[in-house]
Amino acid sequence: MRIDLFFELPMPPQLARTESQAVADWLDEIALADSLGFGCAWLVEHHFMRGYSHCSKPEILLAAATQRTQRLRLGLGVIPAPYHHPVHLAERVAMLDVVSQGRLEVGLGRGFSPREYQALGVNMEHSRSLTQEALEILRLSFTRRPVSYQGQHTTLENVDILPHVVQQPHPPLWSAAVSPETFEWSAHQGLGVLAGPFKPWFMTHADIQRYQAAWNNATLPRVGMTLGILCLPDGKRAKQLAQPAFEWFYKALYQTTLPVLEKLYPSYEHFRELGKFRHLLALGVNLGLLQTFGMAVAGSPAECIAELAKYRAAGVTHLLLAIGAGAVSTEIVRESMQCIAEEVMPALQDSKA
């Protein structure tokens, strides 16, 4: 199991930092991750989510990160495909792969925010078909030949999409997955899946089993699981610091998903099933509840290893760790990164990571 890192570039009020400080801290953390041997650093793309995520152009940050790292892979986790013209998306992917010298991982998703769709002038009802077309055009761009395509939303005639990716045949492709249908679709498309942290582990575990059952590719299935974590030598201290950080994160997360949870948007019907957990968490987010649901981990290295082992046993191949859920100081983040690299990674990784 590969141990990755996951970042949303949040601006929690308790940290009282500027956006410039947040970016500088992130670049320092990325440089440390490179030296510690983490697998990949994943960045989201979100828009108009004040506080929760100020990462609207992850490709710019990833390009900067290429200059601070040598081995660390860099992940777009994920590009909300409906918001972008497929040609721009393919060009963006190729240029990042060139700049990183072949270290890019590419995640695609539909996005989940009605506000994003409305502001960007996209019909949310077309999210699945727009994402399907973007994936098909992206794959055509990897052939290094001019692209012709006729779809519901996009028509291309002999378009030379440049530059070309470095990795052969192409960078690893992933799909964000929340609904069971998307897990199955991802398997049929031969994509890795990126799951969490929207719902409890028992639901995600069932989705992973569905994905594995639908997989018929010659390669092995790839399952990424995003998880909030705080691991420190003193487990009690880790829990004390994690409680307010995770409480802030999950309140902010469910506030951002509130519109799609409360209104049945076409092709987002599955989000309604998550409403029951939003109401439960609204009564009081606490670390014990989150750990019971398998949505967060905090404690000593031994405690974290015991918790994380269940994800590997269930077929998770890549753990995307959101250290402190982005809501602790950079000093604590780096302390936890060091602890995870020294104590946790050796116990969970193997030669296939």
Image (spheres, rainbow, N blue to C red):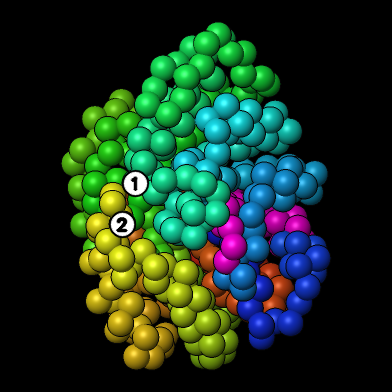
Q: Give how far apart the Cα atoms at labels 2 and 1 are.
A: 7 Å
* Res. 217 image quadrant: top left
Q: State the residue at coordinates (25%, 76%).
A: 276
Answer few, some or many: residues within 10 Å of disc 1's Cα (few below 14, many 20 plus, some between 14 and 19): few
Q: Amino acid at mark 1?
A: Glu
207 left or right, relative to 15:
left
Tell me where the magenta segment starts and ends, as one range: 27-49
- Is there a contact, CB below 8 Å, between mark 2 and mark 1? yes
Q: Is residue 73 visible?
A: yes
209 left or right, relative to 199:
left
Residue closest to the eye, 64 or 147:
147
Q: Which mark is residue 125?
A: 1
Q: Position of residue 63 (x, y in %)?
A: 73, 43
Q: State the residue at coordinates (20%, 38%).
A: 214
Residue closest to the eye, 129 or 250:
129
* Res. 273 image quadrant: bottom left
Q: Is residue 250 above or below residue 211?
A: below
Q: Which mark is residue 173?
A: none
Q: Amino acid at mark 2?
A: Tyr
Answer few, some or many: residues within 10 Å of disc 2's Cα (few below 14, many 20 plus, some between 14 and 19): some
Which numbered disc flags the more N-terminal residue, 2 or 1?
A: 1
Residue closest to the eye, 166 or 199:
199
Q: Which residue is mark 2?
A: 265
Q: State the residue at coordinates (37%, 86%).
A: 282
Q: Position of residue 201 (x, y in %)?
A: 29, 66
Q: Position of residue 327 (x, y in %)?
A: 60, 77
Q: Is residue 335 visible?
A: no
